Amino acid sequence: MDILKDFTNQTIKLKPDYEGEVVATLVSSKFNLGTRTSVLYLHGYVDYFFQAHVAEKFNAQGFDFYALDLRKYGRSLLPHQHPNYCRDISEYFEEITIAIRQIHESGSGKLFLMGHSTGGLIASNYMNFGQEKNLIKGLILNSPFFDFYQNNLQKTLVYLAAKVIASIFPYAKVNGALPTAYAKSLHKDFHGEWDYNLDWKPITGFPTYFAWLLAIRSAHQKLANSNIKVPVLVMYSSASSNLSKFSEEAMVKDIVLDVTDIKRIGAKLGAQVTLLEIENAQHDIFLSSKNVREKAFNEMFAWLNKLESKMD
């Protein structure tokens, strides 16, 4: 069930892949004017676009807002597909390119790309290798997934195991690989304030496929030589905590990623990077407590407005 109001959904038919038919979904705010600077949002892993309040903020600040439910996520997940599965994150470039072209042609021509977590990793790679990266004026990253929250030994062992297993069994998976503490910190039925479709974003997550782990590892490595040409805003929490069970720390820290990784890698994405720490933010900064997310909105729009003034 789609809980969003004041939005339209456009199904984008894509080229069939190794699982068959593929679609993506472009979500558009009904308050878009079609004549303003636009923002295209990419969601994270075990995720889809449901953050209506983010779109409302952008519209109120004079921007048109769009979001993609990428293939095999949310509104785009088809019955024959493995949820959230990919073998290379460049698979998502097709729908991103189509959406960028469509928004660019119908709007003012100014377009920003925004990504949260895995969406931030995908967006960063797109801005290095994507077909229409030159149509993007700036990149906004909300807790981008630049490295696994593990030590070097753990990362090496997981990578070696994944490489062997995925080469033999492409759909081999681990159930319950993601802790539930983060999801419980968000959803209104537990400790959070947000309502969303639990079929599309389950509390227990979806299975984590070894092939997906390899795809993410490859995407991380490609950013070692990142050379994004446009201004980049990298936002992250003031602290991380590696929790397996819910506690109050989950409400004021990033319990999914290590913020030191975000800062270290984010600073090297390009020549025009702004690092922005948001005190007491959760992993999805715009799902944090109201005072925290309002501060993040204010800081982000200050950056955007300053950038836009230079373009005029």
Image (cartoon, rainbow, N blue to C red):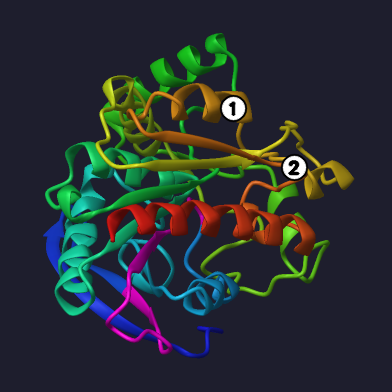
Start and end of the magenta stretch? 26-46
Q: What amino acid is found at the position of numbered circle 1 in the picture?
A: Tyr
Q: What amino acid is found at the position of numbered circle 2 in the picture?
A: Glu
In the image, residue 235 lies at what x, y percent? 56, 43
Sequence-wise, which precedes: disc 1 or disc 2?
Answer: 1
* 185 within the magenta span: no
Indicate which label's residue lies in the foreground, 1 or 2.
2
- Quick check: can you spot residue 171? no
Q: Mark 1 points at which residue?
A: 149
Q: Distance between the residues labelled 1 and 2?
A: 20 Å
In the image, residue 36 lies at what x, y percent? 32, 76
Seen from the viewer's position, the closer of residues 167 and 12 is 12
Q: Which residue lies furthest to the top in this view?
A: 153
Q: Name the residue under label 2.
A: 279
How crowded is the residue under tag 2: few (<14 C-alpha within 10 Å), some, or many (20+)? some
Which quadrant of the view contains residue 29? bottom left
Q: Residue placed at 46% from the left, 43% from the top?
A: 233
